[in-house]
Amino acid sequence: MYKLAIIGYGAAGFAGMIKANELGVKPVLIGKGEVGGTCVNVGCVPSKRMLHVGEIYKVAREVTGSEVYPEFAAFREKDLLVQEMRKTKYEDLLSYYDVELIQGEARFVSPHAVKVNGKVIEAEKFLIATGSSPLVPDIPGIGEAGFWTNREALSPDRKIDSLVVIGGRALALEFAQMYRRMNVDVAILQRSSKLIPDWEPEASIEARRIMEKEGITVVTGVRVKEVRRGAGKVVVTDKGEVEADEILLATGRKPNVELGLDNAGISLNERGGIRVNQELRTDNPNVYAAGDVLGGKMLEALAGRQGSVAVENALTGSHKTIDENAVPQVIFTQPNFARVGLTEVEARAKEGKMESRVLPMSSVAKAEILDARDGFVKMVTLNGKVVGVHAVGENVAEMIGEASLAIRLGASVDDLVETVHVFPTIAESLRLVALAFRSDVSRLSCCV
């Protein structure tokens, strides 16, 4: 019997494997598909590479005044990066760490055993880290007409001239901008009345403005009734029809929970993911779960942290927890969208004095220098403590970690004001928005 079996070899699974070795335990690592999971293969790494390519060509067009766009061959070139990072960050680690790898599909056959490739694997403790898959909504005709998910959109089999994106959250915005900067006509169809509806209203307004500024058609409050084949693919909505070469479904992801969980006494939560307590333990006290399979925030960095904490709790009984309120989220469009902590509405529901300030990015010297005035930074406080930061702007992804740390450590507005920041940087916007609680920032010199 193994001391620990890890099911899934993406971010959460590998983090759990590394933590097990740190604790002197050799785990068995069970997985199927590409080693490394979604992020390195068909998620964060290739999509951010393609967004970067789009940014380079946008600058080239602005500098040269010519209509130069990247070739679709750039999608194939990004595969070299994926292969390199999968090798160095995942495959090579399998020989560096003390682990037994089994490739195959695991299903629980009892509370303490799974079957893989016809063989029963028993373990004292388990970590489930099987990730998630694209959610395909039940739209009449979608199967017959065909569609893309993020996987196909990152490795297109042909050049297209037009794309319909169904959805209006992070993935939809990133891929819409990515393809628009490949000189593809793009339309976003969003069921909700606004884009990124769970973000602050200021961010939703900026999202639409930025997408439309790129030349992307945005239709909100629209219901997709059916899809059919025409000269291209025709999407029929309650507001009319739109035809495009291809359809991208950006309608969310579902946890991969087809694991025979009933046999292990494990139940699901209201999101369709595995139910866990704050220590990431399932209904079965010997089974823990981490990452996208929980159905919560589907973030690679969070998955890795959860995998590490879950394994430490499983093997040592340390009872560690993660403050998810201090976990940042980013949409990597240009400009970036970033958030951490409570929204203003959420903070108002808490006891105490809520205040908020919004600093336009045009008030930040580095944004002026970069000619990147789009966006803002919003800070939400409760009794003088920073509880939420929401930002849209050039490279705000690079500074949201400081806001996360401030929230995690219970920093006050004065703590940020009294911290000297580098001038000129976008990160300085955190100090400036904190200063806005005390004074009129527009009346201050650069380095007050």
Image: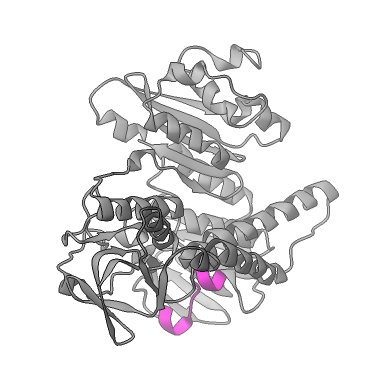
Is 175 left, or right, of 365 in this rendering? left
- Please say if 394 is above or below 303: above
Report x, y in % for residue 367. 66, 32
Q: Is residue 144 magenta?
A: yes
Residue 297 in sight:
no
Q: Main secondary structure of the magenta part?
A: helix
- Res 327 → quadrant: top left
Part of the protein shown in magenta = 142-153
The count of marks equals 0
Report x, y in % for residue 139. 37, 74
Residue 334 in sight:
yes
Residue at the image position 52 percent from the left and 47 percent from the top: 208
Q: Residue furthest bottom?
A: 118
Residue at the image position 54 percent from the left and 73 percent from the top: 152
- Please say if 305 is above or below 272: above
- Res 446 → quadrant: top right
- Please say if 8 is above or below 217: below
Report x, y in % for residue 28. 36, 70
Q: Quadrant of the N terminus?
A: bottom left
Report x, y in % for residue 173. 52, 55
